[in-house]
Image (spheres, rainbow, N blue to C red):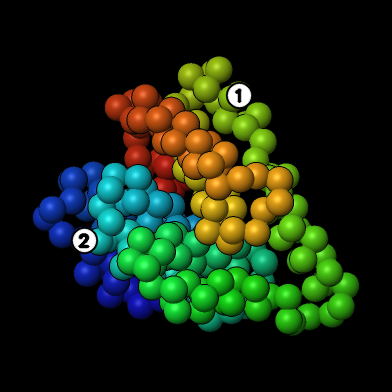
């Protein structure tokens, strides 16, 4: 992803704390680092959470432009960016772009050994059926009043919910049920928003 995208989205309309976070990501930007990619994804979802949709869409589109790699640790973050981009494209009724982005996610099933492809497909199908939607770690952080950790995990929980919503292939969960979970999660994030140090959420401190 071109580093100039960070310069483009960093503007005076943003809250100061977000301007500072973007400047920090830009300062230590390393396009080959999984850590940097994770920060970019967290930042894009945080911008989305604050309804800064223009900036979130630009950033998620930039993440989506990263070429496919068979490095699962890296690609899972690219997928998260693609999913947010799909959400914005759906809002714009841009069906051709949605199809293109969905194919980019599915192309991992076309590479590697037969065993690797089967494993990837199995993980993908389990994800769609909600197998990775446990809230135990979120609940633990909430019970300990560790608000930064709770918010950070809820942000990543949102990624999982959006994945199911945008891929639209779940047999176990209806769109209505997914939407209900999304709204509930966002409501709970809102309740603790005033207690959060957002740099900790982005840099996973």
Q: How many numbered circles are shown?
A: 2
Residue 174 pos. (x, y %):
61, 45
**Quarter of the figure with residue 3:** bottom left
Residue 183 pos. (x, y %):
44, 36
| In-image side of 123 versus 49 (left or right) | right
In depth, the one of 87 and 112 nearer the eye is 87
Name the quarter where the N terminus is drawn: bottom left
Residue topped by disc 2: 10
| In-image side of 134 versus 187 (left or right) | right
On residue 157, which mark appears? none
**Quarter of the figure with residue 122:** bottom right
Circle 2: is it few (<14), some (14-19), or many (20+) Cα within 10 Å? some
As drawn, the residue found furthest toward the left would be 12
In depth, the one of 66 and 23 nearer the eye is 66
Residue 40 showing in the rendered view = no
Residue at left offset 42%, top offset 42%: 201
Residue at left offset 59%, top offset 53%: 164
Q: Is residue 8 above or below residue 196?
A: below
């Amino acid at each position: 992803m071109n580093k100039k995208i960070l310069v483009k989205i960093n503007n005076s309309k943003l809250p100061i704390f977000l301007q500072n976070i973007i400047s920090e990501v830009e300062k230590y930007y390393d396009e080959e680092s999984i850590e940097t990619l994770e920060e970019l994804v967290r930042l894009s979802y945080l911008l989305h959470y604050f309804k800064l949709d223009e900036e979130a869409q630009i950033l998620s589109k930039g993440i989506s432009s990263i070429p496919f790699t068979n490095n699962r640790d890296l690609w899972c973050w690219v997928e998260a960016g693609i999913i947010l981009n799909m959400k914005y494209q759906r809002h714009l009724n841009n069906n051709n772009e949605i199809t293109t982005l969905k194919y980019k996610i599915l192309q991992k099933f076309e590479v590697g050994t037969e065993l690797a492809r089967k494993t990837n497909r199995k993980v993908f199908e389990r994800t769609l059926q909600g197998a990775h939607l446990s809230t135990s770690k979120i609940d633990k952080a909430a019970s300990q009043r560790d608000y930064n950790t709770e918010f950070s995990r809820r942000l990543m929980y949102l990624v999982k919910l959006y994945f199911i919503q945008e891929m639209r292939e779940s047999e176990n969960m209806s769109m209505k049920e997914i939407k209900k979970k999304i709204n509930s999660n966002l409501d709970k994030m809102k309740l603790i928003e005033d207690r959060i140090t957002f740099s900790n959420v982005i840099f996973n401190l």
